[in-house]
């Protein structure tokens, strides 16, 4: 396995979807290639950082919808239901 | 979006709310919009990146949900159902907008020499941030980097990693094959890594 081939398997590896035979090759290449170790570590952290990018520390409190949008949605519902009748 | 399993009380509450919505109860509609609208607006803002358009998307998504409340299946969560509707509505909006020329992602992908080795040594990243304020700065930097991705890569990354859609669901809403979705996501990750190298590599100041 070359470095280029290894990078093609990264997403499957990060998601734990790499078939056993390829995983053995992947891990063997990594043992002898510090460059791929660096790339793989940074890639894995990139995926994690992407997932967490939009989390807020106070995520448990859901964002509130502005009052004027609530009114607009409810008014549009009335208009639509009148159009249908 | 991954929603935690509903507690029985939530299921009962939702079933009661759906029943009221189906009878046309105005108060039930307001309750639904106030309960779910904030989360839906966050999703719309992330995807369309324009406040007015995001609000239009939320309104359109609610109207579409109201029309099909009769076909809502009790075994799903209302929040999950509405999440899918707002994602679809936002993507329709993005498709209509397609006037911008897509920039190439090639410059952000790793380069290889003839023997399949890295053409330039990949940078090793340093230690992970340890304090809450550092992590918040990291999140802001990552959001900024995601914004720099070409549109189709930004979208696939948001749908899979942030909104939590599966590969098949993402493929369906983007109207591409599951394999194309995987390839795009992988390129998005590679490009995002390149954009973040300057912040996270050991050599970074």
Image (spheres, coloured by chain):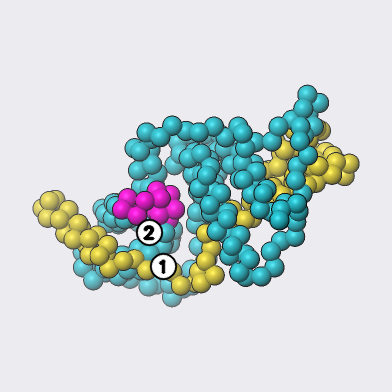
Chain colours: A yellow, B cyan
Residue at x 47%, y 33% (from the top left corner): B102
Residue behind mark 1: A63
The residue marked by circle 1 belongs to what chain? A
In terms of depth relative to the viewer, which is nearer, B69 or B74?
Answer: B69
The residue marked by circle 2 belongs to what chain? B
Instruction: Indicate the quadrant where residue B117 lies.
Output: top right
Question: What x and y, as percent, mark residue B175?
Answer: 45, 36
Question: Majority secondary structure of the magenta segment?
Answer: helix
Query: Does B53 appear in magenta?
Result: yes
In the figure, B151 relative to A75: above or below? above
Direction from residue B88 to residue B66 in the image, left or right: left
Residue interval drawn in magenta: B43-54
Say whether marks 1 and 2 touch (CB < 8 Å).
yes
Find numbered disc 1 in the image and state the secondary structure of the residue it sits on: loop
Query: Does A40 appear in magenta?
Result: no
Dot 1, crowdedness within 10 Å: few (<14), some or many (≥20)?
Answer: some
- Judged from this view, the residue extending furthest toward the right is A32
In terms of depth relative to the viewer, which is nearer, B196 or A40?
Answer: B196
Direction from residue A76 to residue B172 in the image, left or right: right
């Amino acid at each position: 396995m070359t470095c280029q081939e290894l990078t093609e398997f990264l997403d499957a590896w990060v998601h734990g979807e790499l078939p056993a035979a390829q995983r053995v090759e992947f891990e063997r290449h990594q043992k002898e290639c510090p460059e791929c170790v660096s790339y793989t570590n940074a890639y894995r952290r990139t995926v994690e950082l992407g997932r967490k990018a939009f989390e807020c520390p106070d995520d448990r409190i859901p964002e509130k919808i502005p009052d004027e949008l609530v009114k607009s949605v409810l008014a549009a519902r009335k208009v639509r239901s009148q159009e249908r009748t | 979006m991954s929603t935690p399993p509903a507690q029985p009380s939530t299921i009962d509450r939702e079933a009661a709310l759906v029943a009221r919505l189906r009878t046309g109860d105005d108060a039930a509609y307001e309750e639904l919009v106030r309960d779910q609208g904030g989360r839906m607006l966050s999703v719309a803002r992330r995807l369309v990146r324009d406040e007015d358009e995001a609000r239009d998307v939320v309104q359109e998504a609610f109207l579409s949900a109201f029309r099909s409340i009769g076909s809502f299946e009790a075994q799903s969560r209302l929040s999950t159902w509405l999440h899918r509707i707002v994602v679809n509505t936002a993507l329709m909006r993005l498709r209509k907008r397609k006037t911008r020329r897509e920039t190439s992602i090639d410059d952000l992908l790793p380069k290889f020499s003839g023997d399949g080795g890295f053409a330039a040594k990949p940078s090793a990243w340093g230690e992970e941030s340890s304090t809450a304020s550092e992590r918040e700065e990291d999140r802001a930097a990552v959001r900024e980097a995601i914004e720099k991705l070409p549109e189709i890569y930004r979208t696939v990354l948001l749908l899979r990693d942030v909104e939590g859609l599966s590969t098949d669901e993402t493929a369906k809403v983007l109207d591409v094959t599951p394999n194309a979705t995987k390839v795009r996501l992988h390129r998005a990750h590679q490009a995002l890594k390149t954009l973040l190298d300057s912040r996270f590599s050991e050599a970074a100041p």
